[in-house]
Amino acid sequence: MSDQEEQRVLRVKGRVLVGPDEVRDELWAVGGRITYERPPGADRAVTVRGWALPGLVDAHCHVGLDRHGPVDAATAEKQALADREAGTLLIRDAGSPSDTRWVDDREDLPKIIRAGRHIARTRRYIRDYAHEIEPGDLVAYVAREARRGDGWVKLVGDWIDRDAGDLTACWPRGEVEAAIAEAHRLGARVTAHCFAEESLTDLVEAGIDCIEHATGLTEDTIPLFAERGVAIVPTLVNIATFPDLAAGGEAKFPRWSAHMRQLYDRRYDTVRAAYDAGIPVYVGTDAGGSLAHGLVAGEVAELVKAGIPALEALSATAWGARRWLGRPALEEGAPADLVVYDEDPRADVRVLAAPRHIVLNGRVIG
């Protein structure tokens, strides 16, 4: 870092939301890091004013992927920029066939925690997205993606079985247990795409760390999730597409279509019941497949609509989400990644849709 970069000073003045109940009047960023002590060179600082939150987290996002599969770097950059402009400064990339390591060298783009490439059963997922394998190879592929990722591995836990005409589980219990154990041995956590009910018990009892979507939770499996501390990322902005998906498959797969509608109809009740039981809930949009990037504010609003208290929904994309992913928020010495708003987002989460300033590594980006 150059001397000029080392001395770069930013002042954030107003209300700094260090935690849900901890508010300070200002913070400083020096050389891209947060401090709460007035630094040398403060008289030359750039000042921004407003309500400051830690950079938002999208815990289910796909940079480098669209509905057809991997995309080029220019398209991936546009995706990351759309997330950044929405205030998302930390992404857990829940599966991508593209190599996005080049993003790590860009101080103007969100930070990414990668889960490697999806691992799916043969012909049981979207074409060109995943490694498509049979159960005997699951442990080896999980080990491969655990080594390539940033501490996460992504399985496809269920998908439509064309012979059954409905969603069914993709993996036998024994192979799942061995694969999750191997990921944990290598220091990685495991998550899985799951729409339906069938696969959940085996995955949780096998030691999985998180379930994406989790629309198939029931009164039988919710206590199991709560007991084991398994998190969910509901992606409600994606679940909103279920009626259209069901309509498109009605003629060929009527059982699947009816099932998808049932999962959609009870989506808010499912999320609220999970929250009430003490299951950790985090914000994720599932951007990058068929969904646009930059939907994080809409997902927080959906969690509130489901009945999660506004402050808890906010934490699910801010302080709590960062803690879950092992990344700092607005602590002393943390990277100065934050979003500034005109009003208090704790009072109304709709404020998240209109960031006033984006700050990445101590630089005002927008």
Image: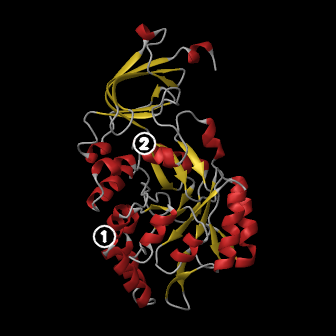
Q: Quadrant of the C terminus?
A: top left
Q: Residue at x 73, y 69 (%)?
A: 139
Q: Is residue 128 left or right of residue 221?
A: right
Q: Nearer the viewer, residue 135 or 182?
A: 182
* Relative image position of residue 131 (x, y in whole percent): 67, 68
Mark 2 belongs to which amino acid?
Answer: Trp
Say which quadrant the N terminus sits in. Answer: top right
Q: Any mark on residue 269, and which?
A: 1
Asked whether the beta carbons under mark 2 and mark 1 sit within 8 Å of each other, the answer is no
In the figure, residue 177 lies in which quadrant?
A: bottom right
In the rendered image, which quarter is residue 307 located in? bottom left
Classify mark 2: residues with Cα within 10 Å, few (<14), some (14-19) or many (20+).
Answer: many
Residue 267 visible, this orientation? yes
Query: Which residue is located at x 32 percent, y 58 percent?
Result: 303
Q: Is residue 166 left or right of residue 311?
A: right
As displayed, is residue 102 above or below residue 184? above
Crowd rating for badge 1 (residues with CA inside 10 Å; few <14, some 14–19, many 20+):
some
Q: Give percent across and percent down for residue 15.
A: 30, 28
Q: Secondary structure at mark 2?
A: helix
Q: Position of residue 82 (x, y in %)?
A: 44, 46
According to the picture, the residue beneath numbered tag 2 turns out to be 319
Seen at 39% across and 60% down, the residue is: 278
In the rendered structure, find residue 28 and report the number of the disc placed on it: none
SS for dot 1: helix
Q: Earlier in the sequence, mark 2 or mark 1?
A: 1
Name the residue located 38 percent from the left edge and 65 percent from the top edge.
274
Residue type indicated by callout 1: Asp
One can see residue 126 in this view: no
Vertical placement of residue 131 versus 361, above or below = below
Outermost front residue: 227
